[in-house]
Image (cartoon, helix red, strand yellow):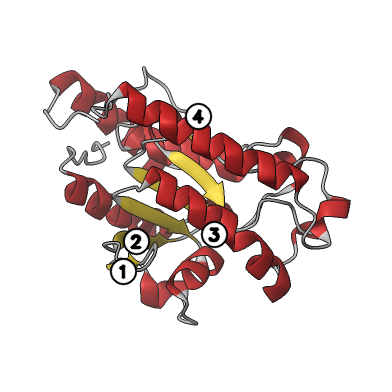
Amino acid sequence: MQKDVDINKVARQHLQMDEFFTGGFLIKGQKVMQEQSEPKESIINSSVELEKVADEVLRCSKCGLGSSRTNTVPGEGNPNARIMFIGEAPGADEDAQGRPFVGRAGKLLDKIITACGLKRSDVFIGNILKCRPPENRDPTAEEIISCLPYLQRQIEIINPEIIVALGAHAARTLLNTNKSIGQMRGQFHEYYAGLGKPPIKLMATYHTAYLLRNYSHENRQRVWEDMKKVLAELGLPIPEPGKK
């Protein structure tokens, strides 16, 4: 990701954030390219390791979800991403396509990512569970215990600078807490990937599915405030919504 301010990029971000705050779902304008500075060899190695995890997920039958899924949804994105977005579990669209966040909630996440001056391919997107719970019910403790090691390995491989936990379930699981999303959002927490490893900053915010159900200016503002803190922490330009 480039850290130099690009005037044209900032102008596009203004337009995109204006559309975000006015409730539109479609993004107009060219998406901004973000270059990775990591060596190609490092990216290749991370890609190989992520593929190994995806193959294990494909063969997994540790819990009952293995018999009810259509496709596994291991996650996708940049193997050297600076940001990882992590949700709760795949929904019907994700189960059908085998990709994370591709339904209406996913399109809204794409919009937020683009408004930040990034592309979906710049980040990594995944979930706590790699298979859809029937009827989109909440994950059970057994399912989380069985599936969480896959996500933990993905985090270790990618080693992002920041994790954005989308919704209470993801944030509670990663932070091992029972706090509400309202108590957690708006501030950085620390996720520990393993003994002897430095903590990764974690920002909890509302899940995009929640935003769709409760699409108000106040909730959009809260999410954007959270994302501005993420951008500031990464040293990236912080766009502001245009005035109408």
Q: Looking at the picture, how far across and down is residue 14, in whole percent?
A: 25, 32
Dot label at residue 163:
none
Q: Which mark is residue 202?
A: 2
Residue assigned mark 4: 26
Vertical arrangement, residue 122 with respect to residue 167, above or below? above
Tag 2, which secondary structure? strand
Asked which secondary structure carries label 3, the reply is loop
Mark 1 in CB contact with mark 2 (< 8 angstroms): yes
Tell me the distance, in whole angstroms, between the alpha carbons under discs 1 and 3.
25 Å
Q: In the image, what residue occupies the spot 41% across and 61% down? A: 205
**Counting other residues with Cα less than 10 Å from the Cα at mark 3, is it few (<14), some (14-19), or many (20 or more)?**
few
What amino acid type is highlighted by mark number 4?
Answer: Leu
The quarter holding residue 1 reads: top left
Residue 18 vs 162, above or below: the answer is: above
What whole-number distance in Å separates the C-alpha atoms at marks 1 and 4? 32 Å
Query: Type of residue at label 3?
Result: Asn
The answer to whether residue 132 shows anywhere in this view is: yes
Helix, strand or loop at disc 4? loop
Among numbered discs 1 and 2, the one appearing first in the sequence: 1
Q: In front: mark 1 or mark 3?
A: 1
> Does residue 101 appear in the picture of this structure?
no
Q: Nearer the viewer, mark 1 or mark 4?
A: 1
> Please, what secondary structure does the residue beneath circle 1 have?
strand
Earlier sequence position, callout 4 versus callout 3: 4
Where residue 95 sits, quadrant-wise, is top right
Mark 3 = which residue?
214
For marks 3 and 2, the one nearer the N-term is 2
Q: Do the numbered discs 4 and 2 sit on residues whose CB atoms are within 8 Å?
A: no
